[in-house]
Image (cartoon, coloured by chain):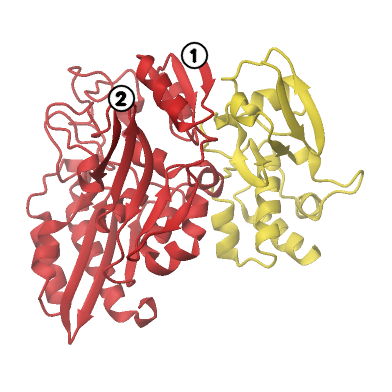
Amino acid sequence: MRTFSYVRAPDVETALRTIATEPNAKFLGGGTNLVDLMRENIERPDVVVDISRLPLTGIDELPGGGVRIGALVRNSSLAAHPLVRTRYPVVSQAVLGGASAQLRNMATVGGNLLQRTRCLYFYDEASACNKREPGSGCSALGGFTRNHGVLGVSDHCIAAHPSDLCVALAALDAEVEVESTRGTRRIPLTEFHHLPGSTPHVETALAPDELVTSVELPAPVTTRSRYRKVRDRASYAFALVSVAAALEVRDDTVTAARLALGGVAPKPWRATEAERVLLGAPATEESFRSAAEAELASATSQDGNDFKIELARRTIVATLRDLLTDRSAA
Amino acid sequence: MRLNVTVNGERRQADDVWEGESLLYVLRERLGLPGSKNACEQGECGSCTVYLDDVPACSCLVAAGQAEGREVRTVEGLAEGEALDPVQQSFVDAGAVQCGFCTPGLVVAAHDLLDRVPDPSDEEIREALAGNLCRCTGYEKILDAVRTAAGAR
């Protein structure tokens, strides 16, 4: 690991001033992704601004039934919080579906939004990677692609976004609050992450001098929500495919549906096509299948991840079926 | 920097610490506590697991500067004098140790599990230990040890 200088920020203002004046600085929260990437020589900051003691650790109820989650809330605290477990079960389940107990104790919500892909070619300095080194090419194309994306990918990058939490947040219309010395702004989570296009190194809407301070969830359309993750091991593995879903049914008709996919795209993938098909449709397996077909219609695959397209369809159907039949989830 | 950290109930200091070195390095190389092991250095294997302010964390991913003023409990701090913690004793009794490199991390993780869930199901044990990799045992004896420790506590 390269040496770097370390600054502990005593308050948000100092953190923002420091990042605004240092050209190659990074915020350090839980460290579970940044430190790893620094060891791998992929992240090479000159200055690390330790924000882990800033008071951004609250989970607060908002007027109207939403919740504000501080950027430095640990994953394990988020998953265990009563408000989150009762109103947004999908969030709790998504968090517990990721990483290990130790890492969930360390990793923060803000860091989760900013975690980088686990594409093996991104990690391997000997491989070409447009994300790591713009213009160098993409060794994943024609390579081992079992973990790569099938939606929203480009000729420049097919890496999948690794987060579980973000998939749930995308389904629930979360908004991200960010601050800099220039002020505060809010970004819908579905616009926070960028698709790769021809610039896969530009991963988010966050400016280099901005700090994620909180994530807000609006009041849930229904508390009947669920996260289903398909992976190569029963635990401690990234998703091959995951589905975050919330479903409201009245008189056997879908009156509200929120759906997002993980493991299949370079960003948390809000399944708007599927939602459009579901809304007002009879709550049946046939409708669920039609919705899944609509969402995956634009999918493109490599040899190694072709299976993900049908797996995603089936996982969507299975998750919605679970929500329909499990009355205890209401 | 001079690092101040409470380790196993004792206030400790280390001088000339680079804030960017890992807590694991501080524990092993500066404070003479080699129980926590350095294996993957990526948070993948759990061999470096310690309690940091009462929750298990991978000490390889914690910068020394982040540990300033905080409380650490390592595998060395689990026994009461000469008396092993029930988790440690059950690892010995069950033969849950082969090369031993993963053992300190597993002991801390299992200790935390039993503090939170005194009578865990096999599924809960597996999930709680998912972040601790063992390349020798195949895990069966480790599961035996945790079940035994749950009964003994």
Q: Indicate the chain coloured red by its letter.
A: A
Amino acid under disc 2: Pro
Question: x, y percentage for residue A66?
Answer: 34, 61
Residue occupying the far right of the picture: B82
Report crowding for label 1: few under 14, some 14 to 19, many 20 or more residues within 10 A (C-alpha): some
Q: Is residue A266 above or below residue A139?
A: below
Q: Nearer the viewer, residue A128 or A261?
A: A261
Q: Residue at x 41, y 38 (%)?
A: A111
Amino acid under disc 1: Phe
Q: Indicate the chain coloured yellow by its letter.
A: B
- Visible residue check, residue A164: no
* Tag 1 subunit: A
Decide: marks 2, 1 in contact (CB < 8 A)? Answer: no
Report whether B111 appears left or right of A275. right
Question: x, y percentage for residue A152?
Answer: 14, 42
Q: Is residue A49 above or below residue A215?
A: above
The secondary element bearing badge 2 is classed as: loop
N-term-proximal mark, 2 vs 1: 1
- Visible residue check, residue A100: yes
Q: What residue is shown with label 2? A: A208
Q: What residue is shown with label 1? A: A4
Q: Residue at x 69, y 42 (%)?
A: B103
Q: Residue A225, located in which quarter of the rendered image? A: bottom left
Question: x, y percentage for residue A189?
Answer: 25, 47
The mark lying in front, picked from 2 and 1, is 2
Q: Nearer the viewer, residue A70 or A32?
A: A70
The secondary element bearing badge 1 is classed as: loop
Question: x, y percentage for residue B120?
Answer: 64, 66
* Tag 2 subunit: A
Q: Residue at x 26, y 69 (%)?
A: A221
Q: Nearer the viewer, residue A324 or A296?
A: A324
**Which image quarter is the C terminus of chain A in?**
bottom left
